[in-house]
Amino acid sequence: MSLLSSALVINDMQAAFKVSNDLHLLAAVRYEIEQTKQGGGAIVIVEYDPVWLGKSHDCLLELLAGYSRVIYVVKDLQDTARRMLLGDKTKQFNEDDGSEQILHAFARSDFRCDRFRFCGVHTEVCILKTVRGLRRLLPHCELSVLQHACRTRFGGLPDGRIVQEFKQLGCSLV
């Protein structure tokens, strides 16, 4: 088992999310992929319903071809829908954050990490939910959001309220 200190988590970089098509954002995510590969770190692709919304951008997936430290995670929408239909409110956070799927994927792999670096889209929703979920499941891990490689639903950086929420979760914004 090899120990990795850091993983890059790429959230929802699917073309159906319009903000993910920003060329500057794609370049920033590509840069982070290259840096992570050079350092031998894990890369986690988190997708929201790829059957309906499509896979992550080809220009990102092409960079990962042949790289052995990639984990693909699909947020568990069926579990979320089932729980909603049954009125099950046993979970504190929204199940579609991908955090449990990330941890299960790491458990099945031969590598571990205790630091997660986030990039992708919908910083104030999708990334925030995943950060919340990982904080809940791994209270002592290090979390950071790579602001240059993230965008909100409206194409910008998170506002002060969202920045404060990340900080309250012990997540740094770099």
Image (tube, rainbow, N blue to C red):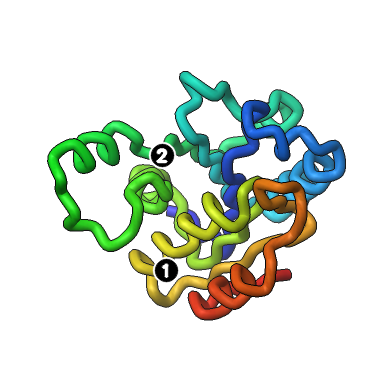
Q: Which residue is mark 1?
A: 135
Q: Is residue 65 visible?
A: no
Return the residue nearer the eye: 117 or 80.
80
Image coordinates for residue 147, horizontal then vertical, percent: 74, 61
Q: Is residue 72 visible?
A: yes
- The label on residue 85 is none
Q: How far apart are the alpha carbons under marks 1 and 2? A: 17 Å
* Residue found 53% across the figure and 50% down from its top: 126
Asked if labels 2 and 1 touch by Cβ distance under 8 angstroms, the answer is: no
Up the image or down, 11 lies above or below 7; here it is above
Mark 2: few, some, or many residues within 10 Å (few <14, many ≥20)?
Answer: many
Q: Amino acid at mark 1?
A: Arg
Q: Amino acid at mark 2?
A: Lys
* Residue found 49% across the figure and 67% down from its top: 114
Return the residue nearer the eye: 125 or 30.
125
* Secondary structure type for disc 1: helix
Up the image or down, 48 lies above or below 153; here it is above
Image coordinates for residue 69, horizontal then vertical, percent: 56, 42
- The label on residue 75 is 2
* Quadrant containing the C terminus in the rendered view: bottom right
Mark 1: few, some, or many residues within 10 Å (few <14, many ≥20)?
Answer: some
Image coordinates for residue 148, horizontal then vertical, percent: 79, 57
Left or right of 123: which side holds 128? left
Image coordinates for residue 46, horizontal then vertical, percent: 52, 41
